[in-house]
Image (cartoon, grey):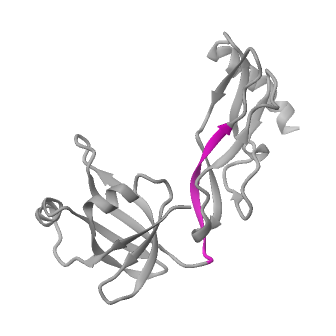
């Protein structure tokens, strides 16, 4: 799992004008909250933060001015809708050994069966893991599934220490015959649901 150190400075000015001044100085306003503590308003270095947040579920080590450090996960990233620049970051305070719920992307390996077409309902699973051991991805091998197979969340092997939060019965992938329409796939799923429930 990626882990990045960022220098975090206290922030005492608020409002749109103050935020604009920070961004002009290549800094990003942020707030750190969690564990029942009062929210802490911070500024983060612009470029380093932007690069860090390109990674999903990155664990941030915030180096505070008093010499202490805090671990945090990004929970909400506000971006400029036109330019895509980061305007504000909400950070969740976490502790060593603490469990958190995160969405982890699925990484597909193996070749789909000849004549098969893969449809995907989601690109990630929601899991509970230790904050300091978040997997970068969940690998899933497609090669053993035949045309007509439906893969549900509960069938996907998880990394050690991870607990599935997504509904185990939620369909994640289906392997259709190439040329099958989306309507045919939905009909096949509907017909399969009573069987899956039973």
Percent position (x, y) of residue 117?
Answer: 68, 20
Residue 78 placement, left or right of 71? left
The answer to whether 171 is drawn above or below residue 187 in the figure is below
Residue 174 placement, left or right of 67? right
> At x 76% / y 49%, what residue is drawn?
157
Spot the residue most to the bottom: 66
Magenta span dominant secondary structure:
strand
Observer-nearest of 5 and 72: 5
Spot the residue most to the top: 179
Looking at the image, how many numbered discs can be counted on the residues? 0
The answer to whether 118 is drawn above or below residue 138 in the figure is above
Q: Quadrant of residue 99?
A: bottom right
Observer-nearest of 54 and 175: 54
Observer-nearest of 157 and 166: 157
* Residue 141 drawn in magenta: no
Specify start and end residues of the magenta stretch as a single range: 97-108
> At x 62% / y 44%, what residue is drawn?
106
Q: Quadrant of residue 160?
A: bottom right
Residue 21 placement, left or right of 51? left
> At x 19% / y 61%, what residue is drawn?
26
The answer to whether 64 is drawn above or below residue 136 in the figure is below
The answer to whether 166 is drawn above or below residue 114 in the figure is below
Q: Quadrant of residue 16?
A: bottom left
Q: Quadrant of the C terminus?
A: top right
Percent position (x, y) of residue 29?
Answer: 25, 66
Residue 122 placement, left or right of 8? right
Q: Quadrant of the N terminus?
A: bottom right
Percent position (x, y) of residue 180?
Answer: 68, 12
Percent position (x, y) of residue 101?
Answer: 59, 62
Spot the residue most to the right: 198
């Amino acid at each position: 799992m990626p882990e990045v150190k960022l220098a975090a400075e206290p922030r005492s000015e608020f409002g749109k004008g103050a935020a604009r001044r920070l961004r002009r100085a290549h800094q990003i306003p942020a707030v750190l909250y969690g564990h029942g503590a009062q929210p802490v308003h911070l500024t983060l270095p612009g470029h380093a933060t932007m690069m860090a947040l390109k990674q999903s579920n990155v664990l941030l080590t915030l180096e505070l001015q008093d010499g202490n450090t805090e671990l945090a996960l990004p929970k909400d990233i506000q971006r400029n809708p036109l330019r895509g620049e980061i305007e504000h970051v909400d950070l969740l305070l976490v502790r060593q050994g603490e469990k958190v719920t995160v969405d982890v992307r699925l990484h597909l390996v193996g070749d789909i069966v000849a004549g098969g077409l893969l449809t995907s309902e989601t690109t990630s699973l929601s899991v509970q893991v230790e904050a300091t051991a978040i997997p970068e991805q969940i690998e899933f091998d497609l090669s053993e599934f035949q045309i007509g197979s439906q893969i549900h969340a509960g069938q996907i092997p998880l990394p050690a220490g991870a607990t599935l939060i997504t509904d185990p019965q939620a369909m994640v992938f289906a392997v259709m015959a190439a040329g099958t329409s989306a309507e045919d796939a939905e009909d096949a799923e509907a017909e399969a649901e009573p069987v899956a429930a039973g």
